[in-house]
Image (spheres, helix red, strand yellow):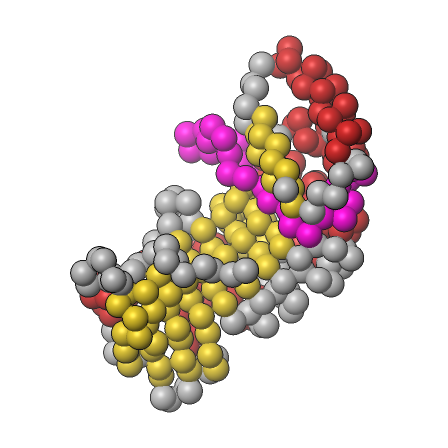
Amino acid sequence: KLSIVILETRTEWKQKIVFSLRKLFFVLSILPIDHVQLGAVHWTIFTDIRMDLYGTFKSITELVFLPDQTPEVGDHNAEQKLEYHRTLLAEWLPRLRATLRCLRVYTFLKVDAELDRVMRRCTKLKTIAIGKLHTYRDHPEFPSIQYVDLDGQSMAYSSDDIRLTKRIRTVFPSARVFRVVRHSIEVLKALLASIIVAGGVFDVYTDLYEISHLLHVLGDTLQSEVVEAHPEEKGAFVEMRCTNERFRTTIHFYNHRVKRYME
């Protein structure tokens, strides 16, 4: 597992950083690294050395774009950052099509037909994490994805967040396990509205772990039963089972702080 986080912002240091990273990649190329995390203040560093990245890490199973290290107020450079991330994904994922199993993007991400085209080449990709959803359009479909992680990073939700979660079963038709944390309750409601009518059994990991709060969100749509109460926090749960007889849907809610989201 390797994490590369670049915090330097001064332009005059850029050439030295690029040179140092290339020397590092030469050493790392002989090591069996299968998990790579990238983070930066200015993502131009990674786009400038992207061919070195692709050549060094060509058989990894998990790729993570970490959240911005010093997010700018209002994210005024969102479009520029999005272009850097889009370039890396469009060029790197096809090279990982035989090995990549997990993609976690906590930076700006556009969920559209282009991402659909790139991800379809990764036949072993089962898990996706979406942090800052920039745009949702074109109604893409990712049939191989089985685990969906929606991490709102405590930011305000957008209309695109709601549109995506309302169509979550269309976008990720094979997914049965969802994690929704640091998001608005409205996003969780939209997700539940989508999976309740789908029928079947689902797992939802959430940070809304107080029983009364979750029941308030569910309303009359689901019949609820506390399977395991939290041993220390009064009024909190570890697991709740909820059912809807009309659509024959069962949802297991898990307190994500106690239960692991996925292996």
Residue lying at 53% horizontally and 36% vertically, measured from the top left: 78
Q: Position of residue 245 (x, y in %)?
A: 36, 88
The image quadrant of residue 116 is bottom right
Q: Is 158 left or right of 55, judged from the image as shown?
A: left
Instruction: Based on the picture, tell me whether residue 218 belongs to the magenta stretch.
Output: no
* Residue name at image x 42 percent, y 87 percent: 248
Does any portion of residue 16 appear in the rendered image? yes
Residue 175: x %, y % from top left: 55, 69
Residue 19 locus on image (x, y percent): 74, 19
Extreme residue in the top direction: 12
Q: Is residue 43 above or below residue 218?
A: above
In the rendered view, tell whether residue 146 sits above or below residue 24.
Answer: below
Magenta region: which residues?
54-80
In this orientation, does residue 188 appear? no
User: Which quadrant of the rendered structure holds the C terminus?
Assistant: bottom right
Closest to the observer: 253 or 239?
Answer: 239
User: What residue occupies the far left of the structure in this picture?
Assistant: 234
In-front residue for pair 93/234: 234
Spot occupied by residue 159 in the image (x, y as percentages of width and height)? 43, 54
Instruction: Give the left or right position of residue 49, taking residue 135 as reference.
Output: right
Q: How many marks?
A: 0
Give the residue displayed 51% in from the left and 61% down from the top. 262
Which image quadrant: the N terminus?
A: top right
Q: Identify the residue at image location x=45%, y=51%.
A: 151
Q: Does the magenta stretch include residue 79?
A: yes
The quarter holding residue 31 reads top right
Q: In which quarter of the image is residue 115?
A: bottom right
Name the foreground residue: 72 vs 30.
30
